[in-house]
Image (spheres, helix red, strand yellow):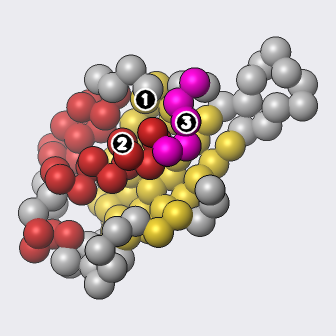
Amino acid sequence: KIDNDRLVSLASSLEENEKVEVAKCHLQGKIVYIEMTLVDSTSKDNAKEIANSTLSEFSEEEINFYDFEYLLKWKANEEDEDSTDTVIGGTKHPYVDSITWTRN
């Protein structure tokens, strides 16, 4: 089982990245949830790279056992009334080699 302290440490290390405002990680059953709120200037490709990098924090055995669920969020620009929050979801199943993104 993945220790909660490891997930807290992962969230802290993600927040050290200047492109990540807030990061949260938790384990529920067989699913590792990783949620990041990113600064406005972070591109979707950069955000996906940051998410992909989290997999290196887990052993191959863990990657082949757990599902990983990602939620990448950007807050709406307060100065632009037409701006809305942006959310991209991603999933990494044990039998798939990479994260599958729901919205590009």
**3D distance between C-alphas at marks 2 and 3:** 11 Å
Is there a contact, CB below 8 Å, between mark 2 and mark 1?
yes
Secondary structure beneath disc 1?
A: strand
Please tell me which residue lies in front, 29 or 36. Answer: 36
Q: Position of residue 86 (x, y in %)?
A: 68, 43
Residue 79's quadrant in the figure?
top right
The segment highlighted magenta reads: 41-45
Disc 2 crowd, CA 10 A, few/some/many (<14, 14-19, 20+): some
Per the image, the residue denoted by label 3 is: 43
Quadrant placement of the C terminus: bottom right
Q: Position of residue 82 (x, y in %)?
A: 90, 31
Quadrant placement of the N terminus: bottom left
**3D distance between C-alphas at marks 2 and 1:** 9 Å
Query: Which badge, 2 or 1, is on the more N-terminal residue?
Result: 1
Is there a contact, CB below 8 Å, between mark 2 and mark 3?
no
Q: Nearer the viewer, mark 2 or mark 1?
A: 2
Q: Residue furthest right?
A: 82
Per the image, the residue denoted by label 1 is: 20
Query: Which badge, 3 or 1, is on the more N-terminal residue?
Result: 1
Amino acid type shown at disc 1: Val
Name the residue rendered at 49%, 45% in the picture.
45
Find residue 50 and name its label.
Answer: 2
**3D distance between C-alphas at marks 3 and 1:** 11 Å
Task: Please give left or right for residue 79 compared with residue 73 in the image.
Answer: right
Q: Position of residue 9 (x, y in %)?
A: 19, 37
